[in-house]
């Protein structure tokens, strides 16, 4: 070999050695950077084997340098190179197989969004992750699913993916990953509130109904379900599950054709409803038995969308320039997460405009709140109030009690705060209708950047990483649920032109309360305004006020507070101490004024479940006819000894029934079943189970003596004593029956008529639809409404007639008029 060839080969080996050495330095530096700076910030490689691949590349480069300088032939060197590459690949694959993490990547149908889920068999966790820079990931949210169990992924829309699996209890539950929005991108919209209204769909040729208000009412073929607002889990601003956790039954999503006008879906928007199931629900042709998601259209009159999508006027000349700026801006932002972009903008605003003067909420949703209290929780309270007042739903009042505040990361100067609340949302009735309200629990995550004049704030939605740039560990939660000053009320905005027909206005109720209770004590009171609603200054000091405080939880009364201020006058963020609280009837003609709870008593879902767990009718609530106090209800008795004489085993029963109740203490379940039908009316019979529904017994052959009804309701207080009501004339009226022999036979109850006089001296008895009787203080009562055709004095929503029995339910006498159902 010539000297020139030797020099050329040596130069080549030197160049390759330098290149490989630089590669070694880069890989080693990257490994150190990853361990020292990236991992401590909760980032890690997208795939767990990637770190092994880095070390494999590092060792390959070292070996290749050695191979280059070994005094062996070219063929042997290539053999060593190939063997080392194969060994490295096998090593990475083997390591990947034993690592505890399993990464799953799902792409949306339009390829715009990526869902990353990670199952960790060592920690026994499953979580959703967010991708950064294409090769890193960071945990976004823990999921309730057990690892190493099958997960089902289904894209309900291009920006909504449903992940379904099983939790530790083996229950099927679901998580909805949402990426889009349907509003302006600034305000938080409760998706259930945006979906408010009536919807219809067609399933197998049958018209189905979906009604969304304080509750969600779903009617499908052979399915009728109801969900309270507090039983629904929100995901972002566009999706909910009906039911939470292992009780989730359906997922409900705003489709991409939805646009929002003032927080409500505009004309043309549709919804998708899909069952929470591990079975195929995509409607794929390969699975003909799959359940198709149901598309719902609105039956309400909705306004056309008032937004704009096209550039108009002089802006048309700059379309190309605008598009170029958007393109390069997006390319720049692709290098950082959305959270990072938002937080950097907040910090920039705090430096450039610390006073917040003239600042309007940006398109990203950042807003400024002028609050500078020394107590951080009070500043957070004011921020929440400002957020809700700016972005609350039109036509909805809200009463909010802050339960807890916790700093998740950072501090008062720059921190992420978690706020948990219990809220009572009310839609005041219009055109004679009664208000409709519901309780719900909410969580808000606020990122705060402090300035001398206040805070720049952004509300991060569920699953977003609001702690970017913060390293301080989370602090302890401040419990505030029993602190009255952390309660506030915010009125909604609505058209009042047709609202106060049967109802008084809040101002009328306040004047009535003042004249009846407070006038003598505070004769020099004057009118005032607080948060847009009427108020009264009670004394000359300017420290004592009467404030309107919304609608009570029975939706039949206005609530008012007497409060004292620390400084003269009413200030938006001032501290107010509650001195007294009152309520006044909403309905015109009723002067029901009484002391009230000082704040709204928020009902948690757990409390509701506990109260619902008692099958016996509890206490007296004139609005629903059920007992509130177990002491007022007769004891159900001992556990039943089993089938009685005359009860016949029904071994061909198919499981259909009209109504069901249970006596838990006695282990008995009753059902009313349809035995026959003729001309729209039905013959009903009673059946009974002693073993939780495994076997059923017929109770009597004709308990209603051949009487029929279009519908039925019934109740038992013990195994012998109970009532039933048969509805007639399309639900216009009903007859009440009583049994004292366990349902073998029912006798009609004698009801005293309550006559009313109309114009022209015409008299009639409007209260002809009895509900189920209830016990109160040892006395048996029943409430009667007016049925489907009732419109006297505002109908059942406003008034019900109460009757009292003195002969153990054989007859009832009129006992007075009580407030109506309000539902």
Image (tube, helix red, strand yellow):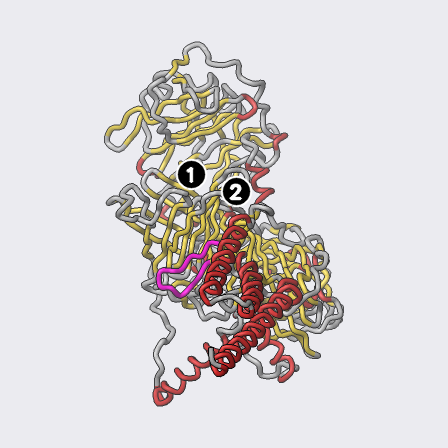
Query: Does residue 111 belong to the magenta stretch?
Result: yes
Percent of width and height locating residue 785: 43, 40
Please give the range of residues in magenta. 103-115
Query: Which residue is nearer to you in this view: 771 or 6?
Result: 6
Q: Is residue 465 visible?
A: yes
Q: Nearer the viewer, residue 23 or 189?
A: 23
**Is residue 491 at all visible to an observer of this figure?**
no
Q: Could you tell me which residue is drawn at 62 percent across and 84 percent down? A: 352
Q: Which residue is mark 1?
A: 767
Would residue 355 be found to the left or right of residue 49 on screen? right
Residue receiving disc 2: 167
**Within the image, what quadrant is residue 269 found in?**
bottom left
Image vertical order of residue 818 relative to residue 69, above or below: above
- Distance of label 1 from label 2 (alpha carbons): 50 Å
In percent of width and height, residue 184 lies at: 45, 71
> Does the magenta-highlighted stretch encompass residue 360?
no
230, above or below 396, in the image: above
Q: As rendered, which of 373 and 332 lies closer to the eye?
A: 332
Secondary structure of the residue carrying numbered label 2: loop
User: Disc 1 on helix, strand or loop?
Assistant: loop
Query: Residue 366 or 742: which is nearer the viewer?
Result: 366
| Residue that appears at 64% across and 65% down | 416
> In the rendering, which numbered label is found on residue 124?
none
Circle 2 Cα neighbour tier, 10 Å, few/some/many (<14 / 14–19 / ≥20):
some
């Amino acid at each position: 070999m010539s000297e020139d060839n030797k020099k050329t080969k040596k130069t080549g080996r030197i160049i390759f050695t330098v290149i490989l050495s630089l590669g070694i330095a880069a890989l080693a530096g990257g490994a150190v950077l990853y361990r020292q700076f990236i991992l401590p910030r909760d980032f890690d490689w997208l795939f767990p084997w990637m770190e092994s691949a880095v070390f494999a590349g590092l060792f390959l480069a070292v070996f290749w340098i050695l191979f280059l300088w070994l005094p062996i032939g070219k063929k042997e060197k290539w053999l060593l190179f190939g063997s080392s590459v194969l060994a490295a690949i096998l090593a990475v694959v083997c390591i990947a197989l034993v690592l505890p993490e399993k990464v799953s990547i799902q792409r949306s149908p339009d390829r715009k969004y990526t869902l990353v889920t990670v199952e960790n068999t060592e920690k026994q966790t499953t979580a959703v992750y967010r991708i950064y820079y294409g090769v890193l990931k960071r945990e976004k949210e823990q999921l309730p699913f057990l690892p190493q169990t099958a997960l089902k992924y289904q894209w309900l829309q291009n920006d909504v993916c449903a992940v379904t699996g099983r939790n530790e209890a083996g229950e099927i539950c679901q998580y909805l990953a949402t990426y889009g929005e349907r509003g302006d991108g600034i305000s938080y919209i409760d998706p259930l509130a945006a979906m408010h209204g009536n919807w219809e769909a067609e399933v197998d040729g049958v018209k189905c109904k979906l009604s969304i208000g304080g509750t969600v009412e779903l009617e499908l073929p052979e399915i009728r379900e109801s969900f309270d607002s507090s039983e629904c889990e929100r995901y972002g601003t566009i999706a909910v599950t009906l039911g939470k956790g292992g009780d989730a039954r359906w997922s409900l999503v705003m489709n991409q054709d939805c646009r929002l006008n003032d927080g409500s879906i505009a004309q043309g928007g549709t919804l998708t409803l899909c069952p929470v199931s591990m079975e195929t629900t995509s409607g794929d042709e390969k699975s003909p038995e799959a359940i198709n998601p149901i598309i719902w259209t609105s039956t309400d009159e909705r306004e056309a969308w008032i937004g704009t999508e096209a550039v108009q006027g002089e802006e048309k000349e700059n379309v190309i320039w605008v598009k170029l700026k958007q393109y390069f801006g997006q390319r720049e932002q692709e290098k950082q997460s959305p959270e990072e972009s938002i937080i950097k903008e907040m910090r920039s605003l705090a430096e450039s405009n610390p006073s917040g003067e003239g600042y309007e909420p940006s398109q990203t949703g950042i807003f400024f709140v002028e609050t500078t209290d020394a107590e951080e929780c009070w500043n957070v309270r004011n921020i929440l109030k400002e957020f809700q007042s700016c972005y609350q739903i039109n036509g909805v009042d809200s009463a909010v009690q802050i339960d807890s505040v916790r700093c998740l990361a950072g501090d008062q100067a720059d921190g992420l705060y978690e706020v948990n609340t219990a809220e009572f949302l009310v839609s005041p009735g219009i055109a004679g209708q009664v208000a409709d309200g519901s309780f719900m629990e909410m969580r808000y995550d606020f990122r705060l950047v402090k300035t001398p004049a206040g805070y720049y704030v952004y509300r991060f939605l569920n699953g977003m990483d609001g702690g970017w740039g913060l390293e301080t560990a989370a602090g302890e939660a401040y419990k505030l649920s029993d602190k009255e000053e952390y309660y506030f009320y915010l009125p909604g905005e609505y058209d009042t032109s047709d609202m106060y027909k049967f109802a008084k206005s809040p101002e009328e109720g306040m004047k009535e309360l003042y004249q009846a209770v407070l006038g003598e004590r505070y004769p020099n009171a004057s009118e005032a305004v607080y948060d847009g609603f009427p108020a009264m200054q009670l004394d000359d000091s300017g420290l004592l006020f009467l404030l309107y405080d919304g609608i009570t939880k029975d939706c039949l009364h206005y609530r008012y507070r007497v409060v004292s201020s620390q400084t003269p006058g009413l200030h938006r963020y001032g501290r107010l101490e509650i001195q007294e609280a009152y309520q006044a009837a909403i309905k015109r003609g009723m002067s029901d004024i009484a002391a009230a709870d000082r704040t709204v008593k928020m009902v948690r879902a757990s409390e509701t479940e506990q109260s619902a767990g008692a099958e016996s009718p509890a206490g007296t609530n004139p609005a629903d006819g059920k007992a509130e106090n177990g002491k007022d209800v007769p004891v159900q008795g001992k556990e039943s000894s089993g089938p009685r004489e005359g009860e016949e085993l029904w071994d061909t029963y198919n499981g259909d029934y009209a109504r069901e109740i249970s006596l838990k203490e006695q282990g008995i379940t009753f059902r009313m079943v349809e035995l026959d039908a003729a001309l729209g009316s039905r013959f009903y019979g009673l059946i009974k189970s002693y073993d939780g529904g495994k076997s059923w017994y017929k109770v009597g052959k004709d308990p209603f003596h051949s009487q029929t009804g279009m519908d039925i309701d019934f109740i038992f207080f013990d195994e012998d004593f109970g009532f039933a009501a048969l509805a007639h004339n399309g639900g216009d009226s009903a007859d009440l029956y009583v049994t004292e022999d366990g349902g073998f036979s029912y006798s009609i109850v004698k009801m005293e008529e309550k006559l009313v006089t109309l114009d022209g001296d015409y008299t009639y008895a409007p209260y002809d639809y009895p509900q189920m009787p209830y016990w109160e203080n040892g006395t048996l009562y029943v409430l009667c409404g007016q049925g489907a055709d009732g419109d006297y004095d505002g109908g059942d929503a406003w008034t019900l007639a109460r009757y009292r029995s003195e002969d153990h339910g054989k007859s009832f006498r009129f006992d007075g008029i009580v407030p109506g159902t309000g539902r």
